Image (cartoon, rainbow, N blue to C red):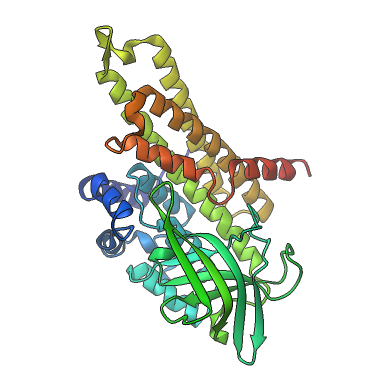
Amino acid sequence: MDFKLTDEQELLRGGLTRFLATRYDLEKSRAAAKTGAGWQPEVWRAFAEELGILGATLPEDNGGIGGGPVEMMLIAEALGHALVVEPYVDTAVVAAGLLLRAGGAVADALLEQIVAGSAIVSLAAAEPTSGDFWQDVSTRAVRDGDDWVLTGEKIVSSATPLAGHVLVTARTAGERTDTTGISLFVVDLAAAGTGITVHHYRTIDDRRASDIVLDGLRLPASALLGSEGGAWSSLARARDEGAAAVAAEAVGCMRKVLADTVEYCKQRQQFGQPIGSFQVLQHRMVDMYMEVEQAAAAALLAVLKLDEDEATRARAVSAAKATIGRAAQFVGQQAVQLHGGMGMTEELAIGHYFKRLTALQFEFGSTDHHVTRYGRLTTR
């Protein structure tokens, strides 16, 4: 495939790469993730005000710059390469996509705030019994006069500890696993009051997530986004967009891991010579390189198919996520092994990247889930 970036896309990638290389310190980021607020608000503001990446894929009418999936891929890969913990995929890709497709005054106002860097919005879709299936929704929303009352439980809602608003899926009709009857509501966490309990925690890869219990949470009619019971199509697309974005992020992570491993093997001496001179280790690093390149090609194909029909999009995304899952596991494990015991220490970046690559294998559907879905889509 002859794929070339436009001049504008090259400028986007170059500007972001330079910013991250000079102003995103890994040690400072880890400190914020482990002992601080979990992110760096000043970096998030710079993403909006100096780089404009939070609105890069949104239409100009919503304050964005009118980009598309390729711009999303370039941003996610660069953020992965620098191991950025700020919730770009959760807010600027998944939540922003849902808000854009829902439309309406509430959604448009939140989109403007996301572009400006003044709002973080997360999604709460997974439930204790749903596994990899977002259509498995037990949370219920019932009308009470002009209000909605929500009851149910959500788990592992990524970036919610940092967010001011969370988008919640709830069933307004149908049975538990029906794709029809699923609605999407926006919850202002600061104004929610009683009826909601949120438990925050840090994940294995130093991100932040929450479990949410809804016990008669009362929301105004304006909290319903889009049509009642018609959210599944948008949710399915958001999940594929999120999967494609984290696939690109994983490529950035793996490129950095491979480069650091090659450099380490050039410097580490054993038996009076660099270990990188040993043929068996050279072969292993070539295998790592091949996995990275296959993953990059699969991620690119998924991104290019995001605007296709649902079946084509889903097939390409599942192929990419399955390929990424295998590559992330192989590259991460080989990098740690080639670094020896140092590979899992806090002092070296490689251990932090390994944790993120491990977590990425399960975001927006596990590797096994996407292998199964790909098989189902290709045998119809």
> Which residue sits at x=33%, y=67%?
117
> Which residue sits at x=73%, y=75%?
173
> Which residue sits at x=24%, y=45%?
27
Q: Position of residue 254 (x, y in %)?
A: 41, 35
Question: In the picture provided, is 196 more to the left or to the right than 170?
Answer: left
- For the C terminus, the quadrant is top right
Return the residue found at the far left: 22
Return the residue found at the far top: 271
Q: Is residue 333 above or below residue 9?
A: above
Q: Position of residue 118 (x, y in %)?
A: 33, 71
Question: In the picture provided, is 41 more to the left or to the right than 90?
Answer: left
Q: In which quarter of the view is residue 273 placed?
A: top left
Question: In the picture provided, is 318 more to the left or to the right than 173?
Answer: left
Q: Nearer the viewer, residue 319 or 153?
A: 153
Return the residue found at the far right: 380
Q: In which quarter of the view is residue 134 placed?
A: bottom right
Q: Position of residue 115 (x, y in %)?
A: 37, 68
Q: Is residue 358 visible?
A: yes
Q: Position of residue 313 (x, y in %)?
A: 62, 50
